[in-house]
Image: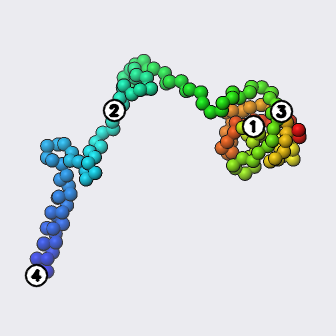
Amino acid sequence: MRTFRLVVSALAVCVALSACGGQDGGDGTPTPTPTGAQPVTSPPSPDPTTPGMPPATGDPVDPTAPVQPPPTKRPGGPTKPPPVGGTTLTGTVTPGVEPNCLLLDGYLLIGGPRDVLSPGAKVTVTGRVQPDMLTTCQQGTPFLVEAARRA
């Protein structure tokens, strides 16, 4: 009797597994999932008529084929262009979202005397904008302070 139960259990497992494995219609086309979506078998090819995208030239497999340069970035970010060279800013110092980060008129103050540059102080700072500098403050355009005084 025990052998009979073991055989029936094994047979039930085999039937269940074979039912799970045969999810297609047998003609090579996949059957929709319960949500109605088709399983992805290959990545979608890019649509050459996508608006805003330049048409691709050259064969991606052929490295000697001419390739169109990437589109230029449109200006964004601050509404005013960063000043170049020695610049003077005047205003009230505000604290940044990160500790020890100080801002003045949208610029992140880097360096300078911390006894003069404190949150709430009205100051005049001289220095230069360093837009390519990486900081941990996550806000403002870096401004290297060369001199600072209370206004």
Q: CA distance from mark 4 to mark 2?
A: 59 Å
Q: Which residue is mark 1?
A: 105
Q: Position of residue 130 (x, y in %)?
A: 72, 32
Q: CA distance from mark 2 to mark 3?
A: 53 Å
- The residue type indicated by label 1 comes to Asp
- The residue type indicated by label 4 comes to Met
Q: Tell me the quadrant of the picture where the N terminus can be found.
A: bottom left
Tell me the SS state at disc 2.
Answer: loop
Q: Which residue is mark 2?
A: 45
Q: Earlier in the sequence, mark 4 or mark 3?
A: 4
Mark nearer the viewer, 4 or 3: 3
The residue at the far bottom in this view is: 1
Whether residue 62 is visible to the viewer of this picture, yes or no, is no
Mark nearer the viewer, 2 or 3: 3
Q: Earlier in the sequence, mark 2 or mark 1?
A: 2
Taking 92 as reference, is 88 above or below it? above
Tell me the SS state at disc 3.
Answer: strand
Q: Earlier in the sequence, mark 1 or mark 3?
A: 1
Taking 119 as reference, is 59 above or below it? above
Q: Position of residue 109 (x, y in %)?
A: 77, 40
Q: Which mark is residue 126?
A: 3
**In the picture, residue 48 is in which quadrant?**
top left
Q: Which residue is mark 4?
A: 1
Q: Position of residue 122 (x, y in %)?
A: 85, 41
The residue under the point 19% across, 42% down is: 29
The residue under the point 20% across, 47% down is: 31
Taking 60 as reference, is 38 above or below it? below
Q: Is residue 22 left or right of residue 137?
A: left
Tell me the SS state at disc 4.
Answer: loop
